[in-house]
Image: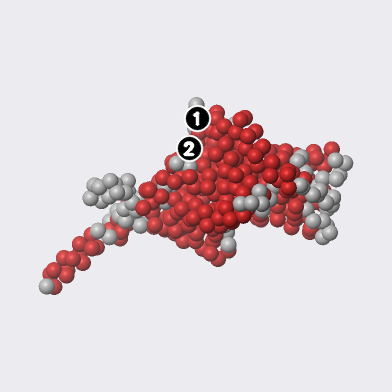
Amino acid sequence: MFELYKTALWGIYENSGLVGILGNFSGGGWKFVAMLIVAFVLLFLALRYGFEPLLLVPIGFGCLLVNLPLSGILDAVGQNGSIHGGFLYWVQKGIEHELYPIIIFMGIGALTDFGPLLANPVTFLLGASAQLGVFVAVSGAMAWGFTIQEAAGIGIIGGADGPTAIYLCSKLAPHLLGAVAVAAYSYMSLVPLIQPPVIKLLTSKADRAIKMDQLRPVSKLERVLFPIISTIICGLILPACAPLVGLLMFGNLLRESGCTERLSQAAQNEVLNMATIFLGISVGGTMAGDTFLQLTTLKIIVLGFIAFAFSTAGGLLLGQVFKVISHGKINPTIGAAGVSAVPMAARVVQKVVQKENPNSFLLMHAMGPNVAGVIGTAVAAGAMLTLLTK
């Protein structure tokens, strides 16, 4: 009987993940240990410091799951050769078939108030100028040896829009998806740390103290027509951006129509939450130690920082132009909110300007370029898809 138990316990050990790690530690098992540490770091940052917890918790846990050797959770086929693959293998099909990012865009649309943008349409241009970092990073990535498709997937990090980065990278460079997603969401969570130094570098105290006039009221008709017209225009000019922009605007139409409150609430809550969970776990599932721990990952993180910094700078520089044209009526710092990190970037602008002028309230003004940045990043992604998938 003792021998039977001994044999059973030895059989369990031989088929355990410990053997997968310790049995070949120097040959590659250490990578699983390293990625388990990365998973713990992501979870710690999310749970302890609140860094994008809605995404980093699922991503971190997905990373943990995929780096437990011999679990079969990512296998394309079952261990006995059957066609039934692992859980993450099938969940990741939602990214491969572009479901999760687009569903998330619908939820974002249902949560977004485009009123500040409609009240001051010139801020569309600030959202567009904040895409500068995307194209700077594309050029830098190509100079660093990446292909044009890989460079496009990396450069979109500069838009500070996680779902768009995942959407574009899954189409052009799926092998870089894990690194791009982690970089995108990491920099989104670090907006309060990255943007203030760039703002202070490119604006003066007098610039930051400018107080802007109150925005005009936006009519119900404008709010309802905007998502419909935007979808038609973007879809006709750049058909490749229609899925992202179209579902963004569909979600917003649910919000603004006044007769689809139940659908709007579902898009904002249950549907968005479910898609976010599966997207995060899927992205974490791409972070297997044998593919993630490469020099390429470090390059992507560096390029992502460059992209984000230049995107902030692009919005600020055009903001300075608007300040001159308006004879000092436009505070140039609102250009920094042109990245897609909604509403965090707008809040950062508000916090920075109030240090110079406590009576200045620019949050709603900054929300204009902030939501314009969401559209701008989606359009930039559509342009790259149009040019690079022919």
Q: Amino acid at mark 1?
A: Thr
Residue 241 location (% of width, % of height): 57, 36
Circles 2 and 1, Cβ within 8 Å, touching? The answer is yes
Q: Is residue 151 left or right of residue 255?
A: left
**Residue for point 72% across, 38% down:** 125
The numbered mark at residue 231 is none
Residue 217 location (% of width, % of height): 79, 49
The answer to whether one can see residue 204 in this image is no
The total of numbered circles placed on residues is: 2
Residue 351 location (% of width, % of height): 74, 57
Q: Amino acid at mark 2?
A: Lys
Q: Secondary structure at mark 1?
A: loop
The residue that disc 1 covers is 389
Residue 341 location (% of width, % of height): 63, 50
Q: Secondary structure at mark 2?
A: helix
Residue nearest the observer in this picture, 374 or 299: 374
Residue nearest the observer in this picture, 51 or 80: 80
Q: Quadrant of residue 266?
A: bottom right
Quadrant in which the N terminus appears = bottom left
**Residue for point 52% across, 39% down:** 168
Q: CA distance from mark 2 to mark 1?
A: 9 Å
The answer to whether one can see residue 82 in this image is yes
The residue that disc 2 covers is 171
